Image (cartoon, grey):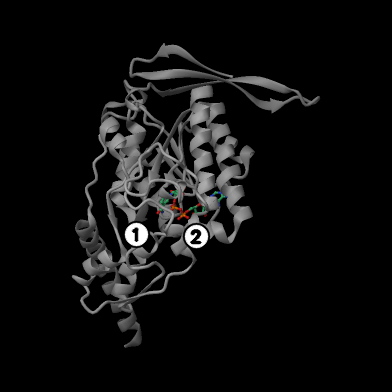
Amino acid sequence: MEVIAPETSRDGWQRRIAYSYACRCKNGSPVPTTLTRWVPQAGINGYGHDPKDSPRHPRVLITGALGQLGQGLAKVMRERYGRDNVIMSDIKKPPPHVLQSGRFLFADVLDLRGLRELVVNYEIDCLVHFSALLSAIGEQNIPLAMQVNIEGVHNVQEVAKQFGLKLFIPSTIGAFGPDSPRNPTPDVTIQRPRTIYGVSKVHAELMGEYYHHRFGLDFRSLRYPGVISADTMPGGGTTDYAQMIFHDALTTKQHDCYLRPDTRLPMMFIDDVLRATVDFLETGSDKLSMRTYNVTAMSFTPEEIAAEVKKYVPDLEVTYQPDHRQAIADQWPEVFDDCNARQDWGWTHRYDLPTMCETMMNALVPQYNQSNNAVDAIEK
Ligand code: NAD
């Protein structure tokens, strides 16, 4: 049982008292313990204010932070909330630059007790749950996908409820299926996905919303489209080609696409994804008419992005050999309708296809030039 006391501090933070069943006595019956936390008061001094004005920033734990999105989000949040207030975690060994950038901890989302310990020991206010097996990888290991994507979600939801945390779990265009309208796909419509990834994400959306209505959990979710980033590599999704084409263009000048040339999918550049996530988390609860929103920036086909990349690498050759990922893409939205995000909390994208391509090229060309120079130097 959880109670939010009507007590508010001068800076707008609210005292939340959570009665939780954190330990068990010898005969196995649960013993209630009382936890008191200060949390940002919804709508008044939530995260939606200039961080410089606040004496206390939220302390955020990111799970699965070594994936495509986590490192970028940690960087953006550390700039806003302070280096020590954002903790990265994963089950992999971090590269040196991650260790140097701030605190990193081992956290397996399948270990409920370990998650509880981290939240208590590091005074976490907000959990960003990025750990997941993505669409293509998930189909290759369904039992593991069920564990990480379903059991892991149960664990973070339970911990967030128990300790009164704000909880963000991203969803995906993959939460829709062949029965959903594909162009455009609205927020609320038929969701009958046919991948374990999609099924587990619908489960996360519904469980989060249930915990919100039943226990007052501040659960939030954005359905991201395919994400394109320059600094990190994709983790095995169906939209990965839209990032790999840049690397192929700048190395072999040959891209073999696993989708048909006319496969239209919604996409976003990482900077937009991270900004959407932070803005959404900082929005006061009173502005949210829903807890799960579609967000997007653009929709394009492999043929269209190839034409754009060829403006920078004219001799790029693209061939098309659809594989098992084509069947997944054929069930997904072509165009995402994110009008509710735009209306409720002011979402606006900054990157369309040409600006995204220009930004990717500006970021990657120097990286490849540098590594080519290094190889030349070694060969000499
Ligand atoms: P990713 O696959 O790149 O990274 C996932 C991370 O989860 C990995 O670093 C992995 O080590 C970690 N992980 C796996 N099992 C774990 C466990 N048991 N405990 C803790 N960590 C574990 O994923 P991403 O692209 O960074 O995506 C982050 C989130 O955004 C995911 O929830 C994903 O579903 C969602 N999303 C991503 C995209 C995209 O295009 N990247 C699109 C839509 C939604």
Q: Quadrant of the C terminus?
A: bottom left
Give left or right: position of 36 versus 303: right
Q: Secondary structure at mark 2?
A: helix
Residue with the most extreme bottom position: 380
Give left or right: position of 360 versus 113: left
- Residue 12, above or below 74: above
Residue in front for this viewpoint, 20 or 328: 328
Q: Amino acid at mark 2?
A: Ala
Q: Which numbered marker is on residue 136? A: 2
Whether residue 122 is visible, yes or no, is no
Looking at the rendered structure, the number of numbered marks drawn on it comes to 2
Q: Which residue is mark 1?
A: 231
Mark 2 Cα-neighbour bin, 10 Å: few <14, some 14–19, many ≥20: many
Disc 2 under 8 Å from ligand 1? The reply is no
**Quarter of the figure with residue 344:** top left
**Quarter of the figure with residue 275:** top left
Residue with the most extreme top position: 6
Q: Amino acid at mark 1?
A: Asp
Give left or right: position of 142 versus 62: right
* Labels 2, 1: front one: 2
Q: Quadrant of the N terminus?
A: top right
Identity of the residue drawn at 43% across and 70% down: 322
Mark 1 Cα-neighbour bin, 10 Å: few <14, some 14–19, many ≥20: some
Identity of the residue drawn at 34% across and 59% down: 231
- Rendered location of residue 61, percent (x, y): 47, 40
Q: Secondary structure at mark 1?
A: loop
- Rendered location of residue 230, percent (x, y): 32, 60
